[in-house]
Image (tube, rainbow, N blue to C red):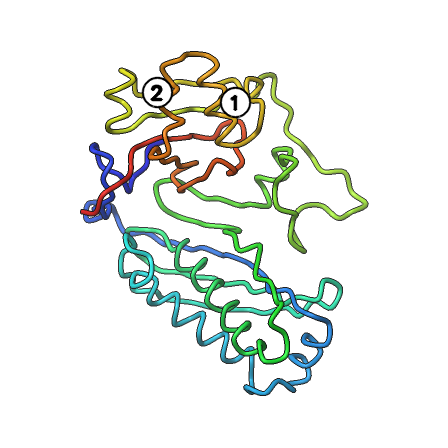
Amino acid sequence: MTLTHLNARGEAHMVDVADKPESRREARARGRIRMQPATLALLAEGGLPKGDVLATARIAGIQAAKRTHELIPLCHALALSKVTLDFELDSTQNCVWVEAFCRLNGRTGVEMEALTAVSVACLTLYDMCKAVDKAMIIDGVQLEEKRGGRSGDFSRQATEVRHAAPADASPLMPGDGPAQDETPVVLVRDEAPLVSVRFLAELRERLGEEQTELDPAQLTAGNIAGVKRALMAADPRYALLAEGRVLAARNQVMATDDTPVAPGDEIAFFPPVTGG
């Protein structure tokens, strides 16, 4: 697995998808906005001062999906064939669940469009309700499912059933995983997958190697900081990872020292990227 948005020099660039075949691409993302019970009741009754909150948030989410390339620098402009936004008012958790679905026939996926739609819809809900509740919290925005493309299909629910979740993982959302009175089915492996560590650009030259692997048992903490400590304990050469300018990514997503790391993950370290 490689970081496709970084070239051989560690510079950020837009991926060329011209040679990829067109195929059906779909993605579904979800998130929520938590609020006071009284705010949720006003929303349900249509009593908020700005009017039809959900209709406005739905239009905002659809518009955001269509304009994702204007917000996320390296995303392609996509001709989406379908965007839907659904809302669930949850009085047990005092929140509104927001779910976005995006589809197209094209050469690149629509995960970012679905995630952007959820994020902007949640922000719109906040704007529409902030007059009565400024303490609202937006959280849990995540990809639930994607289909199509060279990387294959992804289902968060199936992944969480197959693998035991780390202790600091986000809680499952309603509808995900087994019911409370059911025992989850966990895939038992003889050996835990290793954590793959890659060094890009200048770091590769300074270390004289491009890749190494860690046994998850070597990690004193299940995060990026734990990976750094394990590497430095194994070989003093890796002390350069403690330099403040070194950046990190987990499975092609920018990460910080606190980002969780699980068996099978790919961690990449690299110098600051430049435009291009």
Q: Secondary structure at mark 1?
A: loop
Above or below, 63 relative to 167:
below
Residue 60: x, y in percent? 44, 74
Residue 239: x, y in percent? 39, 20
Residue at 64% over, 33% down: 164
Residue 41: x, y in percent? 71, 78
- Residue extending furthest toward the front: 244
Rendered-image quadrant of the N terminus:
top left
Residue at 24% over, 29% down: 201
The answer to whether residue 40 is left or right of residue 125 is right
Residue at 53% over, 55% down: 141
- Pick whichever of labels 2 and 1 is earlier in the sequence: 1
Above or below, 267 relative to 48:
above
**Residue type, numbered disc 1:** Pro
The answer to whether residue 255 is left or right of residue 45 is left
Residue 51 is drawn in which quadrant? Answer: bottom right
Q: Nearer the viewer, mark 2 or mark 1?
A: 2
Residue 87: x, y in percent? 59, 69
Disc 1 residue crowd, few under 14, some 14–19, many 20+, Cα 10 Å: some
Tell which of 92 and 260 is nearer to you.
Answer: 260
**Residue type, numbered disc 2:** Gln
- Gap in Å between the C-alphas at discs 2 and 1? 16 Å
> Which residue has dot 2 on it?
211
Q: Secondary structure at mark 2?
A: strand
> Which residue has dot 1 on it?
193
